[in-house]
Image: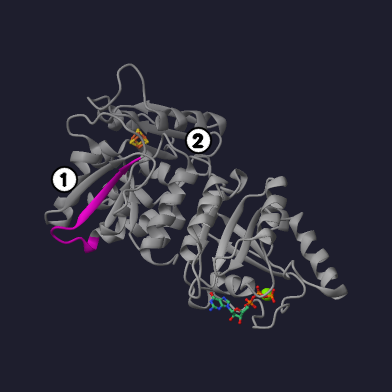
Amino acid sequence: MIKTPKSLRLHIGIFGRRNVGKSSFLNAFVRQAVSIVSEIAGTTTDPVEKPMELLPLGPVLFIDTAGVDDIGSLGQERVARTKKIFDRTDVAVIVSEQGQWAQFEKALLEEFKKRKIPIIAVFNKADLKGVAQSVIAELKAEKIEWLQTVSPQKKGMAEFREKLIAVVPDEFLKTPSMLGDLVKPGEIAVLVIPIDKEAPKGRIILPQVQAIRDILDNDSACIVVKETGLRDTLANFKKKPALVVTDSQAFLKVAEDTPEDIPMTSFSIVLARLKGDLNEFVNGALAIEKLRSGDKILIAESCSHHPIADDIGREKIPRWLAQYARCELKFDVFQGHDFPGNLADYKLVIQCGGCMTNRREILSRIERCRTLGVPITNYGVAIAYSLGKFDRALKPFADSLDYFTGKGR
Ligand SMILES: Nc1nc2c(ncn2[C@@H]2O[C@H](COP(=O)(O)OP(=O)(O)OP(=O)(O)O)[C@@H](O)[C@H]2O)c(=O)[nH]1
Ligand code: SF4
Ligand SMILES: [Mg+2]
């Protein structure tokens, strides 16, 4: 981790007046005493750097700074050193205390806005005083993400992660290749696309089109077949294909018809990695084991489409899960970009593939669930689990398989 060049790390600068709890906030977030904390204003004199790996963003560098309201000639030097950090900040955290948001914080905000640096306002020492409604209204009008923290008690840290993912510049939300690491140049993938009543008339759906394009971009090749033609197609191969990717609906048949030595997975699991965080979804799927009669499960669909007969989210997944869990479960379907207000009531969230949305939205949803302690998985991962094909479907993703078997945690 330390070897990552600094420029590739997301630099998160922590700024504010002296003694507001900047160093306490950093220590609480990274869960280590990296910066000295004391009740004496002006404790941090030189910037303190803390590199770390912050999933799903990757390598980040926190920079704790000296209070920018420092006084005296020595103080001016510290202020100058802190201001230099502005130049290498990718996300600015403005810490203030007890709900205070006055001229000083507003001047910092303007400075970062001018530099087009995303900002998170942290109101620390919320145990002593909360933030006023008028300040919240002001920040909302400016579209600035904000939160309250009590650093010594580590309160607000999960919410800070959520805010970070919401504001982080696109280039740091690294999107892994769809299939490039699984199907090397010159290799062949087999894509299984059932043409049933769920298939749109006259075309194939977006994730499947994207997979074909990704394969071509990587100088690989693919063969597209219906599940009924898979067995014969595989029998005709002189050299084994590198991967079989199937629509989740045909998972069982395709698993049966694909020899064990050919890796196979589903489009939805590929999307779990592309749009979200496969390890987190694997972790969420493990919650299926703990489901009990009457538990509520949220099916979260990122776009509004018209449900059809035997719909995957409304019919198939509920059926397969209830069969696996051997009990009656309650399912709610929620369509759209937000989560319902009662998210904490659910024992599990099952997110759709998210083909019509972006990575940031799915990652934000994962963080929301993490903050509330609600497990989250996605369609493909939940289907593979409830059909008893989890190892098989995860095999192409060694890291996630290790995560599942406990070796990667
Ligand atoms: N009550 C309360 N005290 C806090 C909180 N966070 C920090 N403190 C206390 O506030 C004081 C200042 O904390 P620091 O983390 O050193 O503040 P700083 O902003 O880094 O200060 P300088 O480095 O001097 O600019 C310490 O006594 C902390 O224990 C909080 O959330 N609540
Ligand atoms: S965004 Fe989700 S619900 Fe909409 S089509 Fe894609 S997978 Fe289905
Ligand atoms: Mg400090």
Q: Quadrant of residue 190?
A: top left
Q: Quadrant of residue 197?
A: top left
Q: Amino acid at mark 2?
A: Glu
* Nearest to the observer: residue 391 or residue 23: 23
Residue farthest to the front, as pictured = 134
- Cβ at disc 2 under 8 Å from ligand 2: no
Residue farthest to the top, as pictured = 202
In the image, is residue 292 part of the stretch drawn in magenta? Answer: yes
* Nearest to the observer: residue 406 or residue 336: 336
Query: Quick check: 93 left or right of 181?
Result: right
Q: Position of residue 191 (x, y in %)?
A: 38, 32
Q: Amino acid at mark 1?
A: Arg
Q: Residue at x 63, y 70 (%)?
A: 22
Relative vertical location of residue 350 with respect to residue 26 in this rendering, above or below: above
In the image, the segment drawn in magenta is: 289-301
In the image, is residue 261 part of the stretch drawn in magenta? Answer: no
Q: Position of residue 295 (x, y in %)?
A: 18, 58
Mark 2 residue element: loop
Query: Quick check: 284 left or right of 156?
Result: left
Identify the residue under disc 2. 187
Query: Quick check: 264 left or right of 136?
Result: left
Measure the alpha-carbon separation of dots 1 and 2.
Answer: 37 Å
Residue 12 visible in the displayed image: no
Point out the tag, 1 or 2, that comes first from the N-terminus. Answer: 2
Q: Quadrant of the N terminus?
A: bottom right
Q: Residue at x 84, y 74 (%)?
A: 72
Q: Quadrant of the C terminus?
A: bottom left
Q: Position of residue 38 (x, y in %)?
A: 65, 83
* Nearest to the observer: residue 13 or residue 217: 13
Q: Residues within 10 Å of mark 2 (few under 14, many from 20)?
A: some
Q: Residues within 10 Å of mark 1 (few under 14, many from 20)?
A: some
Identify the residue under disc 1. 319
